[in-house]
Image: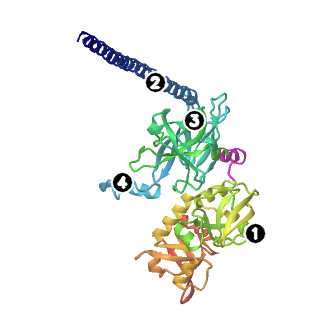
Amino acid sequence: MVKFRNYFLIVFIVICSFILGWGGKQLWYKFHNKNLVAEEKTSLTSESLSMAQKLSEAFSLIAEKAAPAVVYIETERVITSPFRQIPPMEFFGDEFFKRFFSPPRYKERGAGSGFILSKDGYIVTNNHVIEGAQKIIVKLVDGRTFKAKIIGTDSFSDVALLKIEADNLPVLTLGNSDLLRIGEWVIAIGNPFGLTHTITVGVISAKGRSGIGISDIEDFIQTDAAINPGNSGGPLINLKGEVIGMNTAIFTRSGGYMGIGFAIPINIVKTVVEQLKTKGKVERGWLGVVIQDLTPTLAEELGLKVMEGVVITEVIPDSPASRAGLKEKDVIVAINKKPIKNASELRSYILLTKPGTEIVLDIIRNGQKLEFKVVIEAPKKEVLTSKRELEQLNNFLEELGFMVSNITPEIQKKYRLPSTQGVVVVEVIPESPADYAGLSPGVIIDEVNRKKVKNLIEFYQALKPSLQSKKVLLGIKTRYGRQFITLKLD
């Protein structure tokens, strides 16, 4: 019995020792690991804070270095208008007669941003910031002010070059916008709402934005760095302190910042500024085609496997495209091996190409891939029309009460048109000057202001003088024959 008790006691002691030993080890591990986690958290928190502080310091250093080269631009335009309200009791008094025999003049003021390109005072900004200005004042961060003169402007790219008389000015380093990466940190500097030298920070949200309707040349950088009215013309800067874009526009439904801003890539700005500085204008390239986007539906109809590209709807006679052998319904998918997604991309590329440059177009024709070498030329007889001017012309047509289109095979079939030369009326607004003159859908217009027109490009070009005269002489073809009509605004 004693032996059994001793044996039981020994077993009991061994079991307790094992349990206590294992539990103690677990407790030690738990305590040790808890300390390790706490130390690791402390280390990570310290490292994260250090990285954040370094990034914050980088922003501050870049802003401090760049701000002196960013300028505040004030503009003044003199406007003559007879439409300021006249008090009822004075309607037939002296003010009434002064208004119509000597209309009053008003000063309209605007503001924007810009940045200094050279120590001797060349400054770049947006064309829309200084367009129509009779007086331009440039203010530096140190308080100095200068009168600026316009060296050159380009409405197609929305770039303008100014010059002030000064020396040893601070300048910004221009980077390479082709090397930009989505998600990269950027800093915008400008004068939103007159709040001079405001700094905002964000990232590159997207590249190559086009088809937005801001300007004729569209290859925008999209950023979420806050941009507001007054930021136009200011620089967009990377963490190397290099300018990689010029802030130009915002997407908004409220008139203020909504998280989407657009900047012109600095490589485009460089190209335009170089020509403005040496020639005072930009030489535009011309291909000589009328184009539209390749849509999935159109691709299916044309039997194409590609979903992106540009369809040629018309080739202008005696143009670079016609001489190279391009044809209607050809689909342009690349220029110099660079894929082309849409008509806006193609238009921007050609407009930025200097006349005399040879390019290689990748074409799909009847399902077959072909290459064509085309020498870009300067446009003949000012065939180019800026987007702003095009809007004015379309507004003028709307006031007259009709809209037109190129004569496509579908339209020719729809209206049973005898000819493809000219443009065709596709819409007439009831009780408008066009309606009263007898215009109707399906009528062909082949002459505008005594100039023969074969397509929309020539139509708009011949219509330009009507923006001033407020009237237009049209040569039209109807089922009853050819005749002339005059439309004018009262």
Q: Secondary structure at mark 2?
A: helix
Look at 55% across and 79% down and name the residue there.
410
Give me the C-alpha separation between circle 3 and circle 4: 50 Å
Which labelled disc corresponds to residue 44?
Answer: 2
Calculate the distance from the C-alpha at mark 4 to the C-alpha at mark 1: 58 Å
Which residues, given as a range, are shown in magenta? Answer: 271-282
* Residue underneath mark 4: 85
Badge 4 density bin: few <14, some 14–19, many ≥20, Cα 10 Å: few
Give the residue pinned by disc 3: 238
Amino acid marked by disc 1: Arg
Q: Earlier in the sequence, mark 4 or mark 1?
A: 4
Sequence-earlier tag: 2 or 3: 2
- Dot 1 surroundings within 10 Å: few (below 14), some, or many (20 or more)? some
Q: Nearer the viewer, mark 2 or mark 4?
A: 2
The residues tagged by marks 1 and 2 sit, at their Cα atoms, a distance apart of: 66 Å
Q: Quadrant of residue 455?
A: bottom right
